[in-house]
Image (cartoon, rainbow, N blue to C red):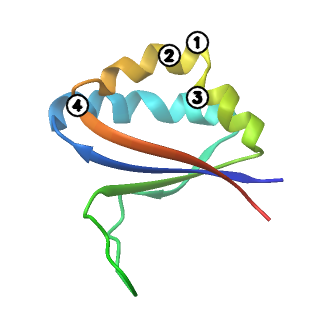
Amino acid sequence: MAAYMVVQLNVTDAEKFARYREAVPSVVEAFGGRYIVRGATVEVLEGSHDGRRFVLFEFPSVEAIKRFWHSPEYAKVKPLRDNAAEVDAWVVAGV
């Protein structure tokens, strides 16, 4: 069953974050993931949005997301976003 990784972030160092943004797609793809939404404008229909960048990934399963997140491959890329963005990330199983 497909699963989704939802990420909201505030980029604090655009130059440093650009290196992360360039490096991470190949790692996502290696674990069967793909971008569904990548930084598009959020239009509020009800309630509020705090203005952070929004990214949505689709993976084959929750387990695939966890393998990606805890992988040695991602561990090499993840430090590129240290001190470059404040990140919240969630996993949601599809129906």
Given the current orientation, which residue lies at the most extreme front position? 47
Callout 4: SS: loop
Contact between labelled residues 2 and 3, with CB atoms less than 8 Å apart? no
Q: How far across and down, in percent of the image, does residue 62 sit? A: 73, 42
Residue occupied by mark 2 = 75
Residue 53: quarter of image: bottom left
Q: How far across and down, in percent of the image, does residue 22 sit? A: 37, 32
Given the current orientation, which residue lies at the most extreme right position? 1
Tag on residue 72? 1
Residue sitting at x 46%, y 13%: 76
Which amino acid type corresponds to the residue marked 4 in the rendered image?
Ala
Residue occupied by mark 4 = 84
Left or right, residue 38 beside residue 48? right
How many angstroms separate mark 3 from mark 2 (CA)? Answer: 8 Å
Tag on residue 85? none
Q: Give the class, few, some or many, for how many residues have Cα within 10 Å of label 2's Cα (few <14, many ≥20).
A: few
Contact between labelled residues 2 and 1, with CB atoms less than 8 Å apart? yes
- For marks 3 and 4 on the same chain, the one whose residue lies earlier in the sequence: 3
